[in-house]
Amino acid sequence: MIINNVFGVDLGTSAVKIYSLHKNQTTTEKNMIAVRNQNQVIAVGNDAFEMFEKAPDCITVDCPVKNGNIADVAEVEIVLQTLLRRADHHIGHAPVIYFSAPVNMSEIEKRAYFAVSHAGNLKNPKVYLVDRAICDAIALGIPLTKTKGSMIVNIGAQNTEVSVISNEQVIISKNINIGGQQLNNAICDEIRRQDNLLVGKRTARRLKAVLATFSEQKEEARKVVGLNTLSGLPREGIVSSALVCQAVEMQVREIASEIKTFLERTPPQIGKCIYAEGIYLTGGTARIPAIDRYLKKMIGVEINLSSYYELCTIKGLEELIKHKPLQRWAYTIRKKK
């Protein structure tokens, strides 16, 4: 029997990534839960996502994490325990769980991570938190003990976290309320405005994946099915890459503007290091082709694009779990190092 299995958990708004030391592998599932009549859980993870925008009115499909923070403790508890067992049946008697967490959390928000871990049948786990930016820095290979100024931009599902690391810690951080889902919403809005066609967020997400780009490419298009906003009847439509790129660019331009303002307010001696080193970019939205070149043009600083994208944070947790010296950056609710 495994006594102390160790897990790394990245509770993202869109997906939950879990690393199991016992199996030495990472699993990813959608951070969603389907509830019938407000009290009966019928699906969790990818199974719940399959019901998204398809379920009848009596079934609610939602994400219990909003803007990177736990919004519903009870639902996150169910999601976490279900997905932990899917990731590794050998949870062990007293598992150790390392959570990646936003930097600027209140004490109540920190306690939520402990609440979802100690409820249910996890058998008294040991719980540690690690700042998300620290996890990203580890995965990116940033020397935490040596850097005098490193900026990391993580474009998540509902928000963009901009953090500056210096003196072995995150010294300043800012949340921008724009992420992948806002890009999806912008695509939906632009299709409705230009074509009088109402499409779902899942459709917008697929369009973003195949048509969004910041590089020069020949015009492409995709056929979609939605509702005519005038008649309310289903109809087909053609969505061009130009439309998708226009919607995406408006959101990314605002992110760039916020980053530039944030950088200008960074202490000069740290800002000098960031300009010399460049800004590190990660997160799922970083997959959009040439987004690094676009941000460089808008901000005026070199952009170092992570090859891990949305898996960057969990990769950092994996390294922290495997290398004991890195565990000094993990902390409990009672004491943050």
Image (tube, rainbow, N blue to C red):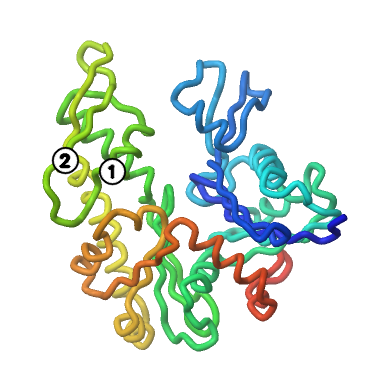
Image quadrant where one finds the C terminus: bottom right
Secondary structure at numbered mark 2: loop
- Give me the disc on residue 210: 1
Q: Please tell me which residue lies in front, 127 or 235.
A: 235
Marks 2,1: beta carbons within 8 A: yes
State the image coordinates of residue 93 (x, y, percent, origin top left): 86, 54
Marking on residue 220: 2
Q: Is residue 337 visible?
A: no
- Disc 1 residue type? Val
Residue drawn at x 38%, y 33% is: 202
Q: Vertically, is 202 above or below 230? A: below
335 above or below 215? below
Q: Position of residue 300 (x, y in %)?
A: 21, 73
Residue 264, picture quadrant: bottom left
Left or right, residue 202 beside residue 64: left
Q: Is residue 197 above or below residue 15?
A: above
Task: Name the amino acid, label 2.
Answer: Glu
